[in-house]
Amino acid sequence: MAKEGIHPNYREVLFLDLSNGFKFVTRSCVSTKETGTTDDGRELPLFKLDTSSESHPFYTGTQKSVDNMGGRVERFRNRFGKLATPSK
């Protein structure tokens, strides 16, 4: 048996991505003051996110790779790589 009053309130929470309006429901202990309605009409605690997997550049494939940044890395190495050699 679990002790009473020491466990966080683990329940279903509606997460809302503010950048694109994407909603998803998962179980969480996060504290919220607002409630939101799911697509199926359930009223759940609402937690607002700045970004989620639906809007993050890494997951959407819009993230730029360091390798294709117009030669910036190579210019940096050419310019500052020479400073790494020990001087006499």
Image (cartoon, helix red, strand yellow):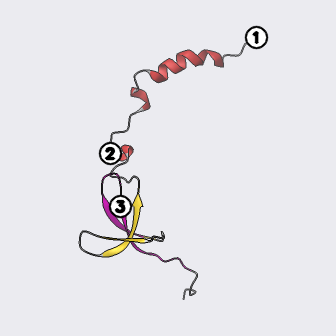
57 relative to 34, above or below: above
Residue interval drawn in magenta: 7-27
Q: Which one is closest to the eye, mark 2 or mark 3?
A: 3
The numbered disc on residue 60 is: 2
Q: CA distance from mark 2 to mark 3?
A: 17 Å
The single residue placed furthest to the left in the displayed view is: 40
Q: Secondary structure at mark 3?
A: strand
**Residue type for callout 2:** Thr
Q: Which one is closest to the eye, mark 1 or mark 2?
A: 2
**Residue type for callout 1:** Lys
| Of the image marks 2 and 3, the number of the one nearer the N terminus | 3
| Of the image marks 1 and 2, the number of the one nearer the N terminus | 2
Q: Quadrant of the C terminus?
A: top right
The numbered disc on residue 16 is: 3
Q: Is residue 85 magenta?
A: no
Which residue is pictured at 56% across the width and 87% down the height? 4
The numbered disc on residue 5 is: none
Residue 39 x/y as whole percent = 24, 68
Among the 4 quarters of the image, the one containing residue 16: bottom left
Residue 68 x/y as whole percent = 39, 27
The numbered disc on residue 88 is: 1
Residue 82 x/y as whole percent = 61, 15
Q: Secondary structure at mark 1?
A: loop
User: Which of these two is toward me, 51 or 7?
Assistant: 51
Q: Which one is closest to the eye, mark 3 or mark 1?
A: 3
